[in-house]
Amino acid sequence: MGLAVTAEVSESGARTGGPARRAGTWAAVVRQVPARLLRLGALGGLLIAVGGVGAGAVLRRDPLLTGSILNAVRYGHGRDLATAVVFVGVALMVYSWVRLGRMVRAGQVDGRGVVLAAAAWTAPLLIGPSLYSRDVYSYLAQGAVALHGFDPYTNGASVLPLSLGGNVASLWQNTPSPYGPLFLLVAKGVVAITGDNVIIGAVLMRLAVLSGLGLLAWAMPGLVRHLGGRTSVALWLTVANPFVIAVGIGGAHNDILMVGLMAVGVLMVLDRKHVRGIAVIALATAVKATAVLVVPFLIWVWVARLSGPARQRFFQACLVGGITFAGVFALSTIVAGVDLGWINVLQSQTPLLTWMSLPCAVAELLYHSVGRHFPGAEYEGFLDFFRSAGMYVLAAVLVRQWWLARAGGVEAVRRAAIALLAASVLAPSVLPWYFTWTLALAAAFAWKDRWLAVAAGFSVWMVLITLPDGTIVARWHYGSANPVVWWSYLAVTVLVGVWVGRALLERPSMWSLLAELRARSGDPDRSGDEGEPGDPGRSTKVAEVVEVIDVADVVEQASPDTGRPPDVQGIHDPQDAGDDDVGVEPDTAGKKRGSTGG
């Protein structure tokens, strides 16, 4: 009787998604990802965190290290050693990510397995020092400015005591906050909890930013369902990406929180929850203004689903969407206790110069190669001209993409991703983590092999061009460093990015696999092991041969038999059904979409 009852309960639990089924499901997920990849990636994250104690964006005066023997890791050879440890950690994480990507493309790991790997690799960084940027100290300072009754949109960190403001980069000491009211509210909350303890404050700020990555992971399966990609690939490109983990989470950038909210808002609009979707986009904009760029594109999605004359539909969507956006944004502003002064801050010229901004790069190149040889030519004039030209070009690109998106649906989201990419390239100042803006949406589309390789290589390159302390290599500031060293290092990072892209796609030749089998079968020391089919000796022999062959590579060789186009990555695993609906667009009555370059 007891056995019968147990069996009945177990079957019921499986049918209703109870604990027994959930335990079995997660056990299967754990088995998907080789333990070696989980351990290597986690070790990489641990080494990045440990090395970051000396090589990262450390405090000006660290209460834990100052005065101790460990303080040596922050200077001279100790810092060089710490930097080397960080790079070893990055290498381990990148290797694990590429191997995981090959398994994802082969259909061996689904989205849940990717999330498991991402969690294992990210965990060591959560309590580590700030990496690749000092922005988290600016966030804390801006929260403290607001908490102490100052206007964060007119005052910088210089009004604070050194314990809070002293760790902000000198470039931003007198710069007001350019961030929205919701993020200032988050920063105020963190500082209210941690006070002057910058170390704990940075950890809490990183956890707040991590919620954005969780939102992105939650939204991605739904975005994939609409946009035609694969959940496992999309999650591999976003939440498991070393660029997102090391730079985005390691640096505690609020861009991750913004893109998480933005992804949820876009998904809601695609799910016909238009008002709620626009409201969430307003919250994303209240974190960082960039999110507002997707609103006009989502209006087209809404317009396409309304009935009536075109002008009436457009007016209705704009009116309701505009009221919703303005209402939510105004509410967040009132709750945060600030005004709209950040709009003026956004309009001011940024003092930061980076060659990743196309206008800055053109201005630097032309001035140093041609302009400085002409009497009266001023660097600031070159820079202002090309920055202004870049903004005009960006405006033209945004308007064109918006107009091309008027069919709504998937096309509107694709154009929104292009618009975000244009903003991250043509802005007056560009930093590596800005490219997470477009990645959050583009990842959900179907990817051709060559573009997936480009995205992988570019992601790793973006990690390498910024040193752990936040220094961006090859700044083109002549005299500040040896340009030969910087340009040589930059060339090496490009080669590494190319290698990563090739490693993701490269398959062993079938001839080489056959040669390996032939060589082992002809080994005189093993000739007695072969036996007949079904013989234990033969089983041992086959196991030894298979052990040296990457199963992901073998599955990739078989991909032409799946019937999918040869330029589309991966094999659709039946286990992924329900979260990897490849190429299915619900609004087109089940018709499958073709591949779209992300």
Image: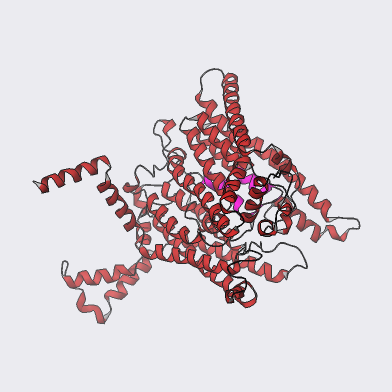
Instruction: Residue lying at the far left in this picture: please name it.
Output: 1
Point 72% across, 68% down: residue: 483
Query: Is the magenta region chiefly helix, strand or loop?
Result: helix
Against 513, residue 298 (above or below) is above
Residue 438 within the magenta-colored segment of the rendering: yes
In the rendered picture of this protein, how many numbered marks are placed on residues? 0
Residue 358 within the magenta-colored segment of the rendering: no
Q: Position of residue 360 (x, y in %)?
A: 73, 53
Point 48% across, 37% down: residue: 267
Instruction: Residue lying at the far bottom in this picture: please name it.
Output: 525
Instruction: Residue lying at the far right in this picture: please name it.
Output: 375
Q: Position of residue 373 (x, y in %)?
A: 87, 61
Against 467, residue 398 (above or below) is above
Span colored in magenta:
420-445
Against 285, residue 527 (above or below) is below
Q: Position of residue 500 (x, y in %)?
A: 51, 62
Colour mode of the rendering: secondary structure
Q: Quadrant of residue 493?
A: bottom right
Left/right of residue 10 with respect to residue 227 in the rendered view: left
Q: Is residue 506 visible?
A: no
Q: Is residue 337 visible?
A: yes
Q: Position of residue 398 (x, y in %)?
A: 65, 38
Left/right of residue 537 with respect to residue 44 in the rendered view: left
Of the pair 166 and 355, the residue shown nearer to us: 166
Of the pair 142 and 120, the residue shown nearer to us: 142
Left/right of residue 395 with respect to residue 468 in the rendered view: right
Q: Quadrant of residue 416?
A: top right
Of the pair 531 and 543, the residue shown nearer to us: 543
Point 25% across, 82% down: residue: 525
